[in-house]
Image: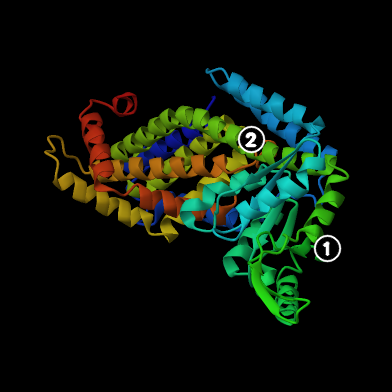
Amino acid sequence: MKRPILIGGISLSFALWLLESLDRSVGEFGEWGVLGLIAVGAGAWWFKQRSPEPLPEIVPETIARSNAEQALNQAKTLLDRLSEESETPCDDLQQRWTQLHDNLDRTDVKLALVGRKNVGKTALAKVLRQQWLQNKDRVEIEEVPAFFRHDEADNLQDALTADLVVFLIDGDLTDSERQVLQQLRQQRQTVLLAWNKGDRYDRPEQDALVDRVRSHVAQILDEDCVCTVAAAPDAIEVRRHQTDNTVVSRRETPEPEISDLTRILDRQLANRSPLVWGTVYRQARLFKNDVKTRLNAVRRDRALPIITQYQWVAAATAFANPVPALDLLATGAISAQLVLDLGNLYQQRLSLQQAQAAAGTLGSLMVKLGLVELSTQLVSTALKHNPVTFVAGGTVQGLSAAYLTRIAGLSLVEYFEQQEVENPATSVDGERLGSILQSVFNNNQRMTFVKSLVRQGIDRFSAKSPEDVVMG
């Protein structure tokens, strides 16, 4: 009775088949047809009753110490769960969490200079170190490599691990630069936008460009977080009148102009703690994702044998039951028990009724997406390439049931992996599950995979009883 849906569903399916065999007076539609319609109707009803989309995680506008501590506590809860479920020690993750927690009280600050190539990051870093950094305690300046192309995307993390970012541009704001600014701000990174090389424009043109930039970032940055700099001014021609009324011309390089930027930096660094807490908050969220990835890997290793077991239970049931319509009842019971077992593995709070609802959703989605017909075609094609020594009428049905059960199981694994561990699901979202189901099916219709499944099935169907098919 540990698996009541599975045992009850399969038993009822075979019992009805026996009754059908004994009573030939039942009409073409018959008693089992009514039950089949009830099963389909229940699945459709539960599909309509799916829960709404979960609310996105709320990210605070400003990061306080309590926000950072909460993010750390959530990561620690997940880490403790991983330690309980994993057979491998998690000492490296424990050390990372301890270091993150200790960072809450650090006083050193890392300033990152961000921008595309040749925008002047190196020149600005040099000037800041020479003219500003000498009077600052425990401040580090780092140049972040450009990350505006797809192959440079990993460099974004370097900007997110800094406490403060100076985003450098040297002209009008491009779409890619604006997108990067949005990404940084969505992660609650503190950003200052510095418009460099202003010395290359005359004053009216410079003012017009800066005003346009301010309008483009008005929804992203505060107005006082935008400034102009000239980190490496170009040499200009200077004419000097001599006492003898002659004019001497020579080229001189003006001094760098960074006073607007340093004024804003001084204001930001006057209270360093919020900058540090923001960095800890971001790193805690990244750390939590790393822990969840490892936890999902542990659970997936345990889920795959469960899926394999149920795929052969489904195959044995379809293979041994000569009444196709009764397969609906048995397959529904198998799918519901699979949902329940995988839900328990991923610690999702699903009741028997909710597991049945999810199974109905899976069945309805498979029909709507045309996966039943496609699976039959794939299995039939694979069978043509195998020397079948034991052929029965239920071979295709059995292998198709095994294939679809595996697809359903893998889809549920991916669905549960996306759930928030600290907020277990109490129902299954049919729309999101449908998207995952389609993706998993597309990734598992390679003929090599289907042929491998068919070979395993032929070996099992050559056994003497349905129990042997399940146990291998």
Above/below status of 27 relative to 400:
below
Q: Is 59 or 19 nearer to us in this picture?
A: 59
Picture disc at residue 287 = 2
In percent of width and height, residue 134 lies at 78, 41
Q: Amino acid at mark 2?
A: Phe
Res 426 → quadrant: top right
Q: Is 163 or 37 nearer to us in this picture?
A: 163
Q: Amino acid at mark 1?
A: Asp
Q: Is residue 275 left or right of residue 365?
A: right
- Residue 122 visible, this angle: yes
Neighbours of disc 2 within 10 Å: few (<14), some (14-19), many (20+): many
Neighbours of disc 1 within 10 Å: few (<14), some (14-19), many (20+): few
Picture disc at residue 172 = none
Query: Which residue is painted at 56% across and 30% down in the image?
Result: 295
Picture disc at residue 224 = 1
Q: What is the spatial separation of the Cα atoms under label 1 and label 2, in whole angstroms? A: 32 Å
Q: Secondary structure at mark 2?
A: helix
In percent of width and height, residue 42 lies at 55, 52
Total tally of numbered discs in the picture: 2
In percent of width and height, residue 185 lies at 71, 55
